[in-house]
Amino acid sequence: MDSVRGQLLIAGPTLLDPNFWRTVVLVVEHSEDGALGLVLNRPSEATVAEAVPQLTSVADPEDEVLVGGPVGPSSVIVLADFEDPDEAALIAFDTVGVMAGGAPAELIGAGIRRARVFAGHSGWGPGQLDGELDRGDWILEPARYADAFTPTPTELWAEVLERKGGSYALVARMPVDPTLN
C-alpha cells in the first residue's frame, strides 16, 4: 500500500456522492488502518467566532468554519501551520497538520502560525480509499500550503485542476450540468 498522506484528493467528474462532489480533500493520515482527510473547499455559513469562540486565539474569528466531511459533523478539527511540527497530533505535509485536542485554554494557539477550523472530517476504513483510488474516483495532486489556507475555498477544485494542467484543466471548466452547455 502506498500512502497518499499529504496529497490532495480531487473529486473526479464521475464521483457523484453528494458528500464529495467537486471537493478537494487533504489527506492527513493514510495507513493500512484507513485514512483521515479534510474537505478544504466546503465553507459553512458559520464563522469561527460564532461556532467556536474559544478558538479565536488560533484562527481568524471572521473565517468560515469549513465542513471537513460527513464523519463527526459536530466535532471540531483544527488544521494548522506549526512552528514545531512535533507539537501536532498528525502532520499531513511540511509543517501543516492537525492540532491535538485537550490543550489548556491558555496554551491554545501557542506555536501556531495559521489555522483553519473544520466541523467534521472525511474517513475511510481499511482499504476503502485504496479501492476508490483504483476505481479512479479521485485525482491525486501534492498539497501545497496555499491549498490548505486558501482565502477562496469555493474556487479550489477548479484551481487545483487548472494547476494540474492537460485534460484536467478541461475538467475544471466543465459546467455543473453538461447538458446545459
Image: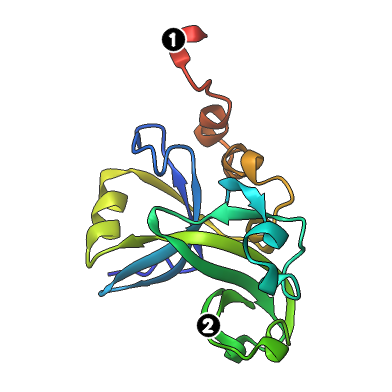
| Whole-percent x, y for residue 39 in the image | 50, 53
Under tag 2, what secondary structure? loop
Q: Residue at x 59, y 89 (%)?
A: 103
Q: Tell me the kind of residue under disc 1.
A: Thr
- Residue at 28% across, 50% down: 132
Residue bearing the label numbered 1: 179
Q: Which mark is residue 101?
A: 2
State the image quarter where residue 51 is shown.
bottom right
The relative height of residue 180 versus residue 135 in the rendered view (above or below) is: above
Query: Which comes before the other along the chain, label 2 or label 1?
Result: 2
Name which residue type carries label 2: Gly
Crowd around label 1: few <14 · some 14–19 · many ≥20 (10 Å): few
Residue in the image at 56% along x and 32% along y: 172
Q: Secondary structure at mark 1?
A: helix
Cα distance in 3D space between marks 2 and 1: 46 Å
Outermost residue to the top: 180
From the top left corner, tell me how far across and down residue 105 is, in percent: 67, 87
Q: What quarter of the picture does the N terminus occupy?
A: bottom left
State whether residue 29 appears in this view.
Answer: yes
- In-image side of 128 versus 47 (left or right): left
Q: Quadrant of residue 122?
A: bottom left
